[in-house]
Amino acid sequence: MRILIVDDEPELGAQIALTLRGQRYTVDIARDGVIALEKICTEPYDLMVLDIMLPQKDGFAVLAELRAEGITTPVLMLTGKGEVADRVKGLDLGADDYLHKPFSMAELLARIRALLRRSHDKASPELVVGAIRLNPNTRSVILGNQPVVLTPKEFSVLEFLLYNCNRAVSRFNLAEHVWGEAFDPFTMSNNIDVHIKNLRKKLDDHAGRVIVTVRGVGYMVRDDQA
């Protein structure tokens, strides 16, 4: 499960990230509303933890734009304010839950688990392009009627490309998503090219050229029937 934390308090953001990673969640952090929107509109997240008081764009503006784009990612809003009006405004804009600062990490984890369960019950998790079916929850890939065995990194690369179907994805964004803070910019391009080559060997013989190279940019999964 992938979670985006949007909070401009470095210590709190780091504490939340450490707690969530300890529970085996994959975590990204955005320090302002503009970066948050860039990430949530281009990358697959299972949940967003969103503070209201942010630089550039506040949490209300981020949430409003998110829902206007039709992105239904569950949002847990954080705020230091206790006014009922703020809570009502957030819920009216499409927030799924609300948590006041200060809060315990145990309560935060409980709220996150509840939202993820609710989201899983409502939506089909599968990403489908042509004959490829990828299930993020079971981390399985089916090509036609046959299972495809992928390494964890191959799975993450394919998942990100399928999520961004018919959109070019840069090597940098792909590396940032798959390797997170651990990626090395000096070896990034070679690592990605190797994983793309391996994915093509496993998929292309049966599904045609699924992953295409976008010269000067990176890669794209193409669905001609979309």
Image (spheres, rainbow, N blue to C red):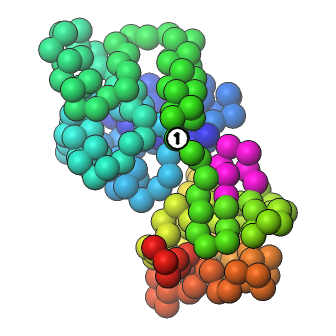
User: Quick check: 165 above or below 134?
Assistant: below
> Between 158 and 36, which is closer to the camera in this rendering?
158
Judged from the image, the secondary structure of the residue bearing numbered disc 1 is loop
Q: Amino acid at mark 1?
A: Ala
Residue depicted at x 76% and y 82%: 206
Image spot of residue 90 (x, y percent): 24, 25
Does residue 57 sit above or below 165 in this rendering? above
Q: Is residue 76 visible to the viewer in this orientation of the structure?
A: yes
Q: Looking at the picture, tell me which residue is in the foreground, 138 or 197.
A: 138
| Front-most of residues 221 and 29 | 221
Would you place residue 190 above or below residue 99 in this image?
A: below
Residue in view at x 83 percent, y 66 percent: 146
What quarter of the picture does the N terminus occupy? Answer: top right
Question: Magenta region: which residues?
Answer: 134-140
Mark 1, residue position: 123
The single residue placed furthest to the bottom in the displayed view is: 215
Rate crowding at label 1 as few (under 14), some (14 to 19) or many (20 or more) other CA atoms within 10 Å: few
Magenta-span inclusion, residue 20: no
Side (left or right) of 52 relative to 118:
left
Q: Report x, y in % for residue 142.
A: 75, 62
Q: Does the magenta-highlighted stretch encompass residue 136?
A: yes
Task: Give residue 5's position: percent from left, percent from top.
Answer: 44, 36
Q: Is residue 177 above or below residue 27?
A: below
Q: Is residue 116 visible?
A: no
